[in-house]
Image: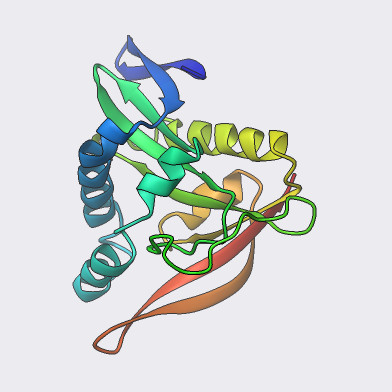
Amino acid sequence: MIATKTILLSGKETVDLYFRHAATNDLMELRQLITRSFLKLSSGHYSHEEIMATIRHVLKYDLEILIADRTYLVAEALGRIVGCGGWCKRSLLPGENGNKDVYFLNPKTEAAKIRANFVHPDWKRRGIASEILKLSCREAKQAGFKKLELLATLNGEPLYRANGFRAVERINVPFPNHIEAPAIRMVKHL
């Protein structure tokens, strides 16, 4: 465990959150949480076609690599994973599996990548994503990185902006069948 935090559950009831590095045996639960989160929390920002294309082509994730590198975190409460996210020190793009010419980023000249931050819809707006992001930034800084970058969804942009990231470019992510989904490239200096 790398951190704990007590949050308000409802009324006066509190619950402890436990933050730790993800493990390989978390993969199934993580994939379910990510899919559920994206389906529910992005529905007001993206069309059904954009959501399904993103799930098929981006949310495949390279979670195994992030877990092996110990750069992916989970938040647990009441015995289940309620949030996840992390950072990447490799040249991977979202959805790549490492079979290409992947290299470790140079912390002095390149930005670490913030990756795959999601919260279970029943646990949103409780500071879980912000805490995971804070822990990820701290770890990247400890690894020598001076800059972070990410590709934010439309619904994720306010979270990142509130945590010190600034938008540098709006793009459309192309998918098969002529579908494109808007996103925002954001950066933060550590």
Compared with 57, 7 (above or below) is above
- Please name whichever residue, 155 or 141, is drawn nearer the observer in this view of the structure: 141
Q: Residue at x 72, y 46 (%)?
A: 145
The total of numbered circles placed on residues is: 0
Image coordinates for residue 187, horizontal then vertical, percent: 66, 58
Q: Residue at x 57, y 66 (%)?
A: 185
Image coordinates for residue 102, horizontal then vertical, percent: 54, 63
- Please name whichever residue, 12 or 49, is drawn nearer the observer in this view of the structure: 49
Residue at the farthest right position: 108
Q: Residue at x 23, y 51 (%)?
A: 35
Compared with 6, 37 (above or below) is below
Q: Residue at x 58, y 34 (%)?
A: 134
- Please name whichever residue, 26 or 125, is drawn nearer the observer in this view of the structure: 26
Picture quadrant where residue 82 is located: top left
Compared with 53, 186 (above or below) is above
Picture quadrant where residue 68 is located: top left
Image coordinates for residue 69, horizontal then vertical, percent: 50, 40
Q: Is residue 155 left or right of residue 43?
A: right
Q: Quadrant of the C terminus?
A: top right
Image coordinates for residue 184, horizontal then vertical, percent: 52, 67
Q: Is residue 128 left or right of residue 143?
A: left
